[in-house]
Image: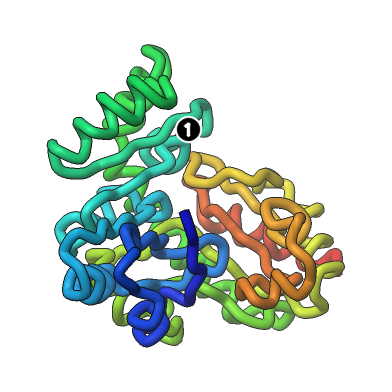
Amino acid sequence: MKVHFIEMTIEEELRAALNEKTRIVYLETPANPNLKITDIEKTAKISHGFNPAIKVICDNTFCSPYIQRPLELGADIVVHSATKYINGHGDLLAGFVVSDAETINQIRLVGIKDMTGAFMPANEAYLVDRGLKTLELRMLRHCENAMKVAQYLKTNDKVEKVFYPGLEEHEGHEIAKKQMHGLYGGMVSFIVKGGREKAAIVADNVKVATLAVSLGATETLIEHPASMTHSPYSEEELEAAGIPAGLIRFSVGLENPEDIISDLQQAFDKI
Protein backbone atom coordinates (compact mmCIF):
# COMPACT_ATOMS: atom_id res chain seq x y z
CA MET A 1 0.00 0.00 0.00
CA LYS A 2 1.39 3.40 -1.01
CA VAL A 3 0.33 6.60 0.76
CA HIS A 4 0.54 10.12 -0.65
CA PHE A 5 0.52 12.97 1.89
CA ILE A 6 -1.05 16.10 0.42
CA GLU A 7 -2.49 19.43 1.54
CA MET A 8 -6.17 18.48 1.55
CA THR A 9 -7.33 22.10 1.58
CA ILE A 10 -5.81 22.65 -1.89
CA GLU A 11 -8.02 21.23 -4.63
CA GLU A 12 -5.21 21.03 -7.18
CA GLU A 13 -3.12 18.81 -4.90
CA LEU A 14 -5.99 16.37 -4.51
CA ARG A 15 -6.60 16.19 -8.25
CA ALA A 16 -2.88 15.69 -8.93
CA ALA A 17 -2.63 12.85 -6.40
CA LEU A 18 -5.55 10.80 -7.76
CA ASN A 19 -4.58 7.96 -10.09
CA GLU A 20 -5.91 4.63 -11.35
CA LYS A 21 -4.65 2.86 -8.22
CA THR A 22 -6.31 5.24 -5.74
CA ARG A 23 -8.66 3.38 -3.40
CA ILE A 24 -9.01 5.71 -0.40
CA VAL A 25 -9.02 9.46 0.15
CA TYR A 26 -8.61 10.11 3.87
CA LEU A 27 -9.16 13.47 5.55
CA GLU A 28 -9.63 15.01 8.96
CA THR A 29 -11.51 18.26 9.45
CA PRO A 30 -10.92 20.27 11.53
CA ALA A 31 -7.36 18.93 11.39
CA ASN A 32 -5.28 18.19 14.44
CA PRO A 33 -3.64 20.33 15.79
CA ASN A 34 -3.77 23.41 13.51
CA LEU A 35 -7.55 23.26 12.84
CA LYS A 36 -7.35 23.49 9.06
CA ILE A 37 -10.72 23.02 7.39
CA THR A 38 -11.24 20.72 4.39
CA ASP A 39 -14.38 20.97 2.25
CA ILE A 40 -15.88 17.50 2.67
CA GLU A 41 -18.48 17.85 -0.08
CA LYS A 42 -15.96 19.12 -2.64
CA THR A 43 -13.44 16.43 -1.71
CA ALA A 44 -16.08 13.72 -2.16
CA LYS A 45 -17.25 15.10 -5.52
CA ILE A 46 -13.70 15.33 -6.90
CA SER A 47 -12.78 11.85 -5.66
CA HIS A 48 -15.96 10.12 -6.81
CA GLY A 49 -15.88 12.04 -10.08
CA PHE A 50 -12.45 10.57 -10.77
CA ASN A 51 -13.52 7.07 -9.73
CA PRO A 52 -16.85 6.22 -8.02
CA ALA A 53 -15.18 3.23 -6.34
CA ILE A 54 -12.89 5.45 -4.27
CA LYS A 55 -13.83 5.45 -0.58
CA VAL A 56 -13.72 8.88 1.04
CA ILE A 57 -13.00 8.47 4.75
CA CYS A 58 -13.42 11.40 7.14
CA ASP A 59 -12.17 11.59 10.72
CA ASN A 60 -14.92 13.49 12.51
CA THR A 61 -13.50 13.27 16.05
CA PHE A 62 -13.08 17.03 16.59
CA CYS A 63 -16.73 17.72 15.79
CA SER A 64 -18.77 14.71 16.89
CA PRO A 65 -21.96 13.88 14.96
CA TYR A 66 -23.73 16.74 16.70
CA ILE A 67 -21.75 19.37 14.80
CA GLN A 68 -20.77 17.69 11.54
CA ARG A 69 -22.14 14.71 9.59
CA PRO A 70 -19.78 13.82 6.72
CA LEU A 71 -21.99 11.05 5.31
CA GLU A 72 -24.57 13.70 4.43
CA LEU A 73 -21.84 15.59 2.56
CA GLY A 74 -20.77 12.67 0.38
CA ALA A 75 -18.20 10.83 2.48
CA ASP A 76 -18.38 7.03 2.39
CA ILE A 77 -16.96 6.23 5.81
CA VAL A 78 -16.68 8.26 9.01
CA VAL A 79 -14.34 7.42 11.89
CA HIS A 80 -14.50 8.77 15.43
CA SER A 81 -12.26 8.45 18.42
CA ALA A 82 -15.14 7.88 20.85
CA THR A 83 -12.62 8.46 23.63
CA LYS A 84 -13.13 12.15 22.95
CA TYR A 85 -16.44 14.07 22.67
CA ILE A 86 -18.77 11.09 22.19
CA ASN A 87 -17.76 9.74 25.59
CA GLY A 88 -16.92 13.19 26.90
CA HIS A 89 -15.60 12.25 30.33
CA GLY A 90 -12.05 11.11 29.63
CA ASP A 91 -12.56 7.64 31.13
CA LEU A 92 -12.50 5.17 28.24
CA LEU A 93 -10.70 4.15 25.05
CA ALA A 94 -13.04 3.45 22.13
CA GLY A 95 -13.55 4.15 18.45
CA PHE A 96 -16.30 3.98 15.83
CA VAL A 97 -16.59 3.40 12.13
CA VAL A 98 -19.82 4.60 10.49
CA SER A 99 -20.88 3.69 6.95
CA ASP A 100 -23.45 1.82 4.85
CA ALA A 101 -24.55 -1.69 5.81
CA GLU A 102 -22.40 -3.48 3.23
CA THR A 103 -19.22 -1.71 4.31
CA ILE A 104 -19.94 -2.21 8.01
CA ASN A 105 -20.58 -5.91 7.46
CA GLN A 106 -17.14 -6.19 5.84
CA ILE A 107 -15.60 -4.37 8.79
CA ARG A 108 -17.42 -6.52 11.36
CA LEU A 109 -17.22 -9.93 9.70
CA VAL A 110 -13.74 -9.60 8.18
CA GLY A 111 -11.94 -6.69 9.80
CA ILE A 112 -12.97 -7.38 13.40
CA LYS A 113 -13.88 -11.09 13.44
CA ASP A 114 -11.02 -12.36 11.28
CA MET A 115 -8.31 -9.72 11.61
CA THR A 116 -8.29 -7.60 14.77
CA GLY A 117 -10.82 -8.89 17.30
CA ALA A 118 -11.18 -5.29 18.45
CA PHE A 119 -14.69 -5.45 19.88
CA MET A 120 -15.91 -2.99 22.52
CA PRO A 121 -16.14 -4.40 26.06
CA ALA A 122 -19.41 -4.03 27.94
CA ASN A 123 -18.23 -1.36 30.36
CA GLU A 124 -16.87 0.82 27.54
CA ALA A 125 -20.18 0.43 25.69
CA TYR A 126 -22.00 1.55 28.82
CA LEU A 127 -19.75 4.61 29.17
CA VAL A 128 -20.34 5.59 25.53
CA ASP A 129 -24.08 5.24 26.05
CA ARG A 130 -23.86 7.46 29.13
CA GLY A 131 -21.90 10.08 27.20
CA LEU A 132 -24.37 10.16 24.31
CA LYS A 133 -27.14 11.21 26.70
CA THR A 134 -25.42 14.55 27.31
CA LEU A 135 -23.73 15.02 23.92
CA GLU A 136 -25.90 17.93 22.78
CA LEU A 137 -25.64 19.84 26.06
CA ARG A 138 -21.90 19.31 26.30
CA MET A 139 -21.16 20.29 22.71
CA LEU A 140 -23.17 23.49 23.03
CA ARG A 141 -21.16 24.48 26.11
CA HIS A 142 -17.82 23.40 24.59
CA CYS A 143 -18.51 25.57 21.54
CA GLU A 144 -19.70 28.56 23.57
CA ASN A 145 -16.67 28.43 25.85
CA ALA A 146 -14.24 27.92 22.96
CA MET A 147 -15.51 31.01 21.16
CA LYS A 148 -15.02 33.10 24.30
CA VAL A 149 -11.50 31.73 24.76
CA ALA A 150 -10.64 32.39 21.10
CA GLN A 151 -11.89 35.97 21.36
CA TYR A 152 -9.79 36.48 24.50
CA LEU A 153 -6.68 35.05 22.86
CA LYS A 154 -7.09 37.47 19.94
CA THR A 155 -6.61 40.34 22.39
CA ASN A 156 -3.58 38.85 24.17
CA ASP A 157 -0.37 40.61 23.13
CA LYS A 158 1.66 37.47 23.84
CA VAL A 159 -0.26 35.48 21.23
CA GLU A 160 0.94 35.62 17.63
CA LYS A 161 -2.06 33.92 15.99
CA VAL A 162 -5.27 32.15 16.97
CA PHE A 163 -6.75 29.21 15.07
CA TYR A 164 -10.47 28.68 15.59
CA PRO A 165 -12.95 27.98 12.76
CA GLY A 166 -15.54 30.23 14.39
CA LEU A 167 -13.40 33.34 13.90
CA GLU A 168 -14.24 35.16 10.68
CA GLU A 169 -10.54 35.65 9.90
CA HIS A 170 -9.91 31.88 9.99
CA GLU A 171 -9.12 30.90 6.39
CA GLY A 172 -11.58 28.00 6.55
CA HIS A 173 -14.38 29.90 8.26
CA GLU A 174 -16.82 29.96 5.34
CA ILE A 175 -16.44 26.24 4.70
CA ALA A 176 -16.76 25.52 8.42
CA LYS A 177 -19.92 27.62 8.60
CA LYS A 178 -21.41 25.55 5.79
CA GLN A 179 -20.54 22.07 6.99
CA MET A 180 -20.36 22.46 10.79
CA HIS A 181 -23.94 23.71 11.21
CA GLY A 182 -22.99 27.05 12.72
CA LEU A 183 -21.06 25.51 15.61
CA TYR A 184 -17.28 25.41 15.55
CA GLY A 185 -16.19 22.91 18.17
CA GLY A 186 -14.34 23.05 21.44
CA MET A 187 -10.78 23.02 20.12
CA VAL A 188 -8.68 26.20 19.93
CA SER A 189 -5.03 26.41 18.89
CA PHE A 190 -2.75 29.42 19.16
CA ILE A 191 0.87 30.38 18.59
CA VAL A 192 2.70 31.89 21.55
CA LYS A 193 5.19 34.61 20.67
CA GLY A 194 8.71 33.46 21.43
CA GLY A 195 8.35 29.94 20.10
CA ARG A 196 8.83 26.61 21.84
CA GLU A 197 10.28 27.93 25.11
CA LYS A 198 7.52 30.47 25.76
CA ALA A 199 4.77 28.05 24.74
CA ALA A 200 6.11 25.51 27.22
CA ILE A 201 5.95 28.11 29.99
CA VAL A 202 2.24 28.65 29.32
CA ALA A 203 1.51 24.91 29.17
CA ASP A 204 3.45 24.24 32.39
CA ASN A 205 1.78 26.97 34.44
CA VAL A 206 -1.95 26.48 33.97
CA LYS A 207 -3.87 25.47 37.10
CA VAL A 208 -7.49 24.99 36.01
CA ALA A 209 -6.53 23.28 32.76
CA THR A 210 -4.78 19.92 32.82
CA LEU A 211 -1.59 19.26 30.85
CA ALA A 212 -2.58 16.19 28.83
CA VAL A 213 -2.63 14.94 25.25
CA SER A 214 -6.28 13.90 24.98
CA LEU A 215 -9.25 16.17 24.21
CA GLY A 216 -13.03 16.43 24.28
CA ALA A 217 -13.49 15.83 28.00
CA THR A 218 -15.48 17.82 30.54
CA GLU A 219 -12.26 19.33 31.87
CA THR A 220 -10.06 21.74 29.91
CA LEU A 221 -6.86 20.14 28.58
CA ILE A 222 -3.78 21.88 27.24
CA GLU A 223 -0.89 20.43 25.26
CA HIS A 224 2.21 21.58 23.40
CA PRO A 225 2.32 19.48 20.18
CA ALA A 226 6.01 20.08 19.41
CA SER A 227 7.09 18.49 22.69
CA MET A 228 4.16 16.11 23.26
CA THR A 229 1.95 14.58 20.54
CA HIS A 230 4.32 15.53 17.71
CA SER A 231 7.60 15.31 19.61
CA PRO A 232 9.18 12.78 17.18
CA TYR A 233 8.98 15.42 14.42
CA SER A 234 12.11 17.36 13.53
CA GLU A 235 11.90 21.14 13.24
CA GLU A 236 11.71 20.75 9.45
CA GLU A 237 8.91 18.19 9.72
CA LEU A 238 6.97 20.40 12.10
CA GLU A 239 7.24 23.28 9.65
CA ALA A 240 6.19 21.09 6.71
CA ALA A 241 3.15 19.87 8.68
CA GLY A 242 2.10 23.43 9.57
CA ILE A 243 2.78 22.95 13.28
CA PRO A 244 4.90 25.84 14.62
CA ALA A 245 7.07 25.08 17.64
CA GLY A 246 5.15 27.76 19.57
CA LEU A 247 1.73 26.20 18.91
CA ILE A 248 -0.50 25.31 21.84
CA ARG A 249 -3.56 23.06 21.40
CA PHE A 250 -6.33 23.84 23.85
CA SER A 251 -9.32 21.56 24.43
CA VAL A 252 -11.84 23.89 26.06
CA GLY A 253 -13.87 22.18 28.76
CA LEU A 254 -17.15 22.85 30.52
CA GLU A 255 -15.84 25.01 33.35
CA ASN A 256 -16.93 28.61 33.80
CA PRO A 257 -15.31 30.42 30.83
CA GLU A 258 -14.09 33.23 33.07
CA ASP A 259 -12.14 30.67 35.11
CA ILE A 260 -10.58 29.21 31.96
CA ILE A 261 -9.58 32.64 30.67
CA SER A 262 -8.21 33.76 34.06
CA ASP A 263 -6.17 30.58 34.20
CA LEU A 264 -4.65 31.26 30.79
CA GLN A 265 -3.91 34.85 31.74
CA GLN A 266 -2.00 33.93 34.88
CA ALA A 267 -0.02 31.38 32.85
CA PHE A 268 0.82 34.04 30.26
CA ASP A 269 1.91 36.33 33.09
CA LYS A 270 4.70 33.85 33.87
CA ILE A 271 6.39 34.64 30.54
Q: Is residue 225 above or below residue 139?
A: below
At a point 58% along the width and 43% down the height, the residue shown is 214
Q: Circle 1 sits in a helix, a strand or a loop, which is it?
A: loop
Percent x, y of residue 257: 52, 56
Q: Residue at x 43, y 25 (%)?
A: 116
Tag 1 residue: 89
Residue occupying the point 42% across, 82% down = 13
Q: Is residue 158 visible to the viewer in this orientation of the structure? A: yes
Locate residue 142, reporting x and y percent: 42, 52
**Residue in the foreground of this view, choosing between 257 and 40:** 40
Q: Position of residue 58 (x, y in %)?
A: 33, 56
- Where residue 233 appears, x then y in whole percent? 74, 62
What amino acid is labelled 1 in the image? Answer: His
- How was this image coloured? rainbow
Q: Nearer the viewer, residue 29 or 252?
A: 29
| Any part of residue 266 in sight | no
Is the C terminus in the top left, top right, bottom left or bottom right quadrant? bottom right
Around disc 1, counting alpha carbons within 10 Å, would you say few (fewer than 14), some (14 to 19), or many (20 or more)? some
